[in-house]
Image (cartoon, coloured by chain):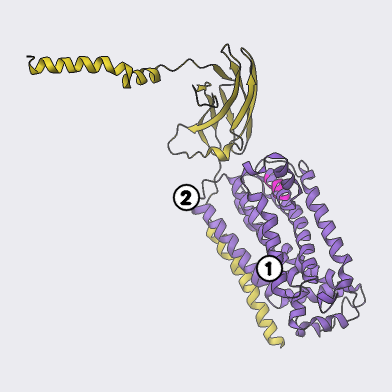
Amino acid sequence: MSEATRTRPATTAAAESPWLVMAEQELRDLWLSGRGLAVMLAHTTLLSITTYLIATNQELNFLEQREAVALTVQVTVAVGGLLVVLVAADAVSGERERGTLETLLLTPVPRRSLLIGKGVAAMSLWFGAFLLALPYLWWIGRDVGTFGSAAAGTFLAGTLLALFLTGVGLLVTTFSQSNGLSLALSFFLLLGLYAPHQLPAEASRGWAGETLLKLDPFTSALLYLERLVINAHTLTQDLPLLVVPALAAAGILTLALALAGRLSLLPRSG
Amino acid sequence: MRTLPARLGLLAATLAALLPLGFAGGAAAQSEPAAPAVEVRLDQDAATAGPGERISFESTVTNASELARTGLVAHLSILTTDPDVYVDPEDWSAQRTQYVDELAPGASTTLTWDVQAVTSGPLVLFVSVTGEAAGPVASSGPLDLTVGGQREVDSGQVLGLVLWTPAGVLALLGATLVRRRRHR
């Protein structure tokens, strides 16, 4: 949070819950400073390049239309997740490194509310990324009637993954001495969770491979989306695949908020 | 003393006598392989599917010999007769090789194959079976698969979408930054 926005009194939410005050301040800081819109610009530029190539490039246009929709869904979820985890990973360690955490801790806001407010701001990037992906999903899938299910499924699975990544970022940033460490660790965790989905099919055979894929929230959620979009399954047909992402999100967020009381200026002393 | 034609004739006769023992003998053995000890049959010979659709079929492997067979390997091949269609079998099926541990004389086993149609076109699928030591290969008859109805993204009006959406976000970003500067 910048100094400029922190000094602004939170008038509308002041009488409400402390986390609402924090959330309002963080959302203002993220979106009115232009940072949120700048990453949304990068997101739409990437989606535009992908969509243009899908539509015009001979090498990519062999894709069946449902596969093209699935590709756009995957890009949206991956980029949205990346944005969420990077902002969440900056939440506390960034304040700590910029020397603004002390001021923040002196405010009469519970530390758990601080983290919730910052988590809400991080999640808003996912919702922004999702909303901006809708025109692309509609345009690519308009002839095969996949827009409704693809949009609903992306919102459902993507929100669970974004919640999970918010928890990962908040947990890491709370206990990171430096912002660089927090960002690097969160980024590599994201890559590590995304990697099993990219493994060749042969690698998923055997009990170890199958267990890994079942326990990885990313693989489960992306498999749900693939079946929804490519195989035209219904929204509820593969809901069990979302159990792992939901449990992972609930677990990591609970852990992050439970440990919020240990948030301090110097993580080593906490 | 023999004349040159007579010598050449003798040489040719000698070579003709020797060849069956060496090269010709090997060639003869290769051109007449042992009869396949197994038979492979598919449960269907034609099918149709839409892009992305999954189909399943079975192959029956029968040990036609009088000896028990072990270590048989069955492999699914997927190819197209259309030179303009690209087929990567890995995209079509993650499991294209299956193993049969033991098959008694006259016994049969059924293998199930799952395939996802990826691209449109006329395709031929067949299953081949061989032993561990790469002996004779027995192949099934073909399964003619027709995948139709592929829909590709229409490129019309794409420029409007890919230019105007980022432009809208850019305009919003510019307005936000101007507003922020004025409030300082």
**A248 sits to left or right of B56:** right
Q: What colour do you see for chain A?
A: purple
Q: In percent of the image, x 84 and y 83: which residue is there?
A: A9
Q: In percent of the image, x 76 and y 57: which residue is there?
A: A159
Label 2 sits on a secondary structure element that is: loop
Amino acid carrying label 2: it is Gln
* Quadrant hosting residue A3: bottom right
Residue marked by disc 2: A58
Q: Is residue A1 visible?
A: no
**A144 sits to left or right of B33:** right
Is A249 in the magenta?
no
Q: In percent of the image, x 72 and y 46: which residue is there?
A: A213
Tell which circle, 2 or 1, labels the residue nearer the N-terminal end. Answer: 2
The relative height of residue B85 versus residue A43 in the rendered view (above or below) is: above
The subunit carrying tag 1 is: A
**A8 sits to left or right of A39:** right
Q: Main secondary structure of the magenta part?
A: helix
User: What label sits on residue A194 in the rendered view?
Assistant: none
Amino acid carrying label 1: it is Ala
* Quadrant hosting residue A208: top right
* x and y, in percent, of residue B5 in the image: 10, 16
- Crowding near the residue tagged with mark 2, few <14, some 14–19, many ≥20 C-alpha atoms within 10 Å: few
Q: Residue furthest front?
A: B1
Range of magenta residues: A221-226
The relative height of residue B146 versus residue A142 in the rendered view (above or below) is: above
* x and y, in percent, of residue B84 in the image: 44, 39
Residue marked by disc 1: A184
**A22 sits to left or right of B108:** right
- Crowding near the residue tagged with mark 1, few <14, some 14–19, many ≥20 C-alpha atoms within 10 Å: few
